[in-house]
Image: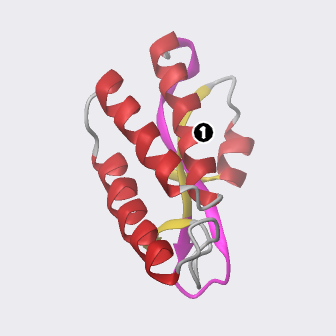
């Protein structure tokens, strides 16, 4: 189940454990919304779950800052440590495409035109 920051904050992170997913674009809304995956009860989350969530938050930060090479490196680290995931594959594909756009424009240190840090669009 995916929830917004507002829902996550009202549900309470003391009771529930959430993993960050990233900023998504919602149809018919301007701007993106940070969403999280509800994983389960907070008291059942292992240190490994918490470490993976923290590393995902780092990955999301790199992505939103348009630091796509760093993002790709973090993806490799995450996959080696935790195995592949559909979400990380989505990030990998977007990073590669956006990095190619940066290179084509000759502006590797700048976000590509139109980039707003969103990983995907939800209906």
Residue 16 horizontal/vertical position (percent): 59, 28
Relative to 109, is 76 above or below? above
Q: Is residue 46 visible?
A: no
> In percent of the image, x 34 and y 22: which residue is there?
81
Relative to 110, is 114 above or below? below
Q: Is residue 14 visible?
A: yes
Foreground pick, 74 / 42 = 74
Foreground pick, 38 / 60 = 60
Residue 14 horizontal/vertical position (percent): 69, 23
Number of on-image labels = 1
Q: Which residues are magenta?
A: 24-43
Residue, disc 1? 58
The extreme front residue here reads 106
As for residue 79 lying within the magenta part, the answer is no
Relative to 121, is 59 above or below? above
Residue 26 horizontal/vertical position (percent): 54, 76
> In percent of the image, x 59 and y 84: which residue is there?
113
The extreme bottom residue here reads 28
> In percent of the image, x 54 and y 21: which residue is there?
50
Say which quarter of the image contains residue 64.
Answer: bottom right
Image quarter of the C terminus: bottom left
């Amino acid at each position: 189940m995916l929830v917004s920051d507002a829902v996550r904050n009202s549900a309470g992170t003391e009771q529930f454990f959430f993993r960050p997913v990233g900023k998504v674009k919602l149809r018919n809304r301007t701007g993106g919304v940070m969403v999280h995956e509800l994983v389960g009860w907070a008291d059942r989350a292992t240190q490994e779950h918490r470490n993976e969530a923290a590393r995902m938050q780092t990955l999301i930060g790199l992505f939103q800052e348009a630091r796509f090479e760093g993002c790709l490196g973090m993806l490799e680290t995450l996959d080696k440590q935790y195995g592949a995931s559909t979400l990380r594959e989505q990030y990998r594909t977007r990073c590669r495409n956006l990095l190619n756009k940066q290179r084509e424009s000759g502006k590797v240190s700048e976000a590509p035109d139109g980039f707003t840090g969103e990983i995907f669009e939800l209906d």
